[in-house]
Amino acid sequence: MKTREMIRDWTATARTLSEALPYMQRYSGAIVVIKLGGHAMGSDEGMALFARDVVLMRQVGINPVIVHGGGPMINEMLSKLDIQSEFVNGKRVTDDATVEVVEMVLSGRVNKRIVQAINAQGGRAVGLSGKDASLVTCTPTDPKLGHVGTPSRIEPGILHTLFESGAIPVIAPLGGGDAGETFNINGDTMAGAIAGALKADRLLLLTDVEGVKGKDGAVITDLSTAQIRELTEDGTIAGGMIPKTETALDAIEGGVRAVVILDGRAPHAVLLELFTEHGAGSLIRAKL
Ligand SMILES: Nc1ncnc2c1ncn2[C@@H]1O[C@H](COP(=O)(O)OP(=O)(O)O)[C@@H](O)[C@H]1O
Ligand SMILES: CC(=O)N[C@@H](CCC(=O)OP(=O)(O)O)C(=O)O
């Protein structure tokens, strides 16, 4: 027996799908870069939901690119190996031993977990790092940070090849140097650089807070570039939020249309942001 409530539920689902049509049309063929931070990578169930949303995006004609972090997973491995680690302005000081661990954890366990999650939902994810196909070449960011790199040259050709074949790139934030060295790149910096090189329509930075909070602790939904500078100067934007807002500014300057900093732990965060009016988090837009 179909109850009235069941029919009402089905109608609501159908209405949600129907209301998504203009958004699907708007984003058809668009490039959306999603940064999945280590803190936003929760349970296997949460990862499966995220992967399903990414496959849905691909299915409706969007070209998603995943750039991931993995800071907490690197910390875990460093502490097992008894290697100390410290951060300066949200970036890990990376010595010879640390860069080896960073590459092993990011290109190995973390990258493959996301690739497998997407493939399990019927997508075709391909894992790579900035070292593959010379995607990202770096110069040292600051001698005090050791092997931390700033992307200086990006060759996005491989990503276009993957788009054309219907594959979903999943990128670990590592880059090569002209002398064959390996650089550790902050995940947000990497996502911004890739989004800029692709002139992406959207850059979504998924993290573990609802957005960028102002002095009163409330999330600022429409964040201007001037506000970012002011809140960074007075210390309201601190720690891991600094590379995110820096990235947002760089990405907008590099030709990305909009950047959103949002809570990746919320179920279907990406779908809500792209396909409904109920965008979440802090939106930073290019000036029209
Ligand atoms: N103004 C701010 N608004 C929101 N979060 C902030 C702010 N300043 C600092 N943070 C911190 O930044 C963290 C997000 O950065 P991080 O831990 O590096 O995330 P991820 O691993 O997702 O990249 C938040 O959990 C929060 O503690
Ligand atoms: C230079 C630098 O800080 N690299 C980061 C790379 C991983 C990362 O960015 O991870 P989240 O996005 O989870 O923070 C690190 O070593 O932790």
Image (cartoon, rainbow, N blue to C red):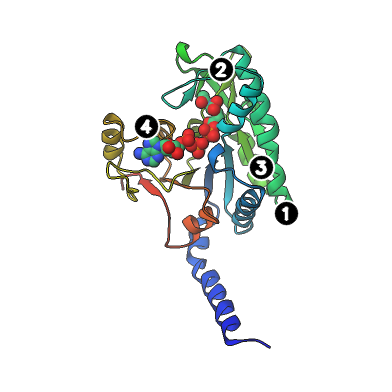
CA separation in Å, label 3 and label 4: 28 Å
Callout in the foreground (1, 3): 3
Q: Which mark is residue 122?
A: 1
| Amino acid type of the residue that numbered disc 2 sits on in the rendered structure | Gln
Label 4 neighbourhood size at 10 Å, few (<14), some (14-19), many (20+)? some
Q: Which mark is residue 114?
A: 3
Give 259 or 82, whichever is nearer the viewer.
82
| Amino acid type of the residue that numbered disc 3 sits on in the rendered structure | Ile
Q: Earlier in the sequence, mark 3 or mark 4?
A: 3
Residue tagged 2: 84
CA separation in Å, label 2 and label 1: 40 Å
Mark 2–mark 3 CB contact (< 8 Å): no
Mark 2–mark 1 CB contact (< 8 Å): no
Callout in the foreground (2, 3): 2
| Amino acid type of the residue that numbered disc 1 sits on in the rendered structure | Gly
Mark 3–mark 4 CB contact (< 8 Å): no
Would residue 274 be found to the left or right of residue 258 on screen?
right
Q: Which mark is residue 238?
A: 4
Callout in the foreground (4, 1): 4
Label 2 neighbourhood size at 10 Å, few (<14), some (14-19), many (20+)? few
At mark 4, the secondary structure is loop
Residue found at x 49% / y 20%: 86
Where is residue 140? Give x, y as percent: 50, 16
Q: Is residue 251 visible?
A: no
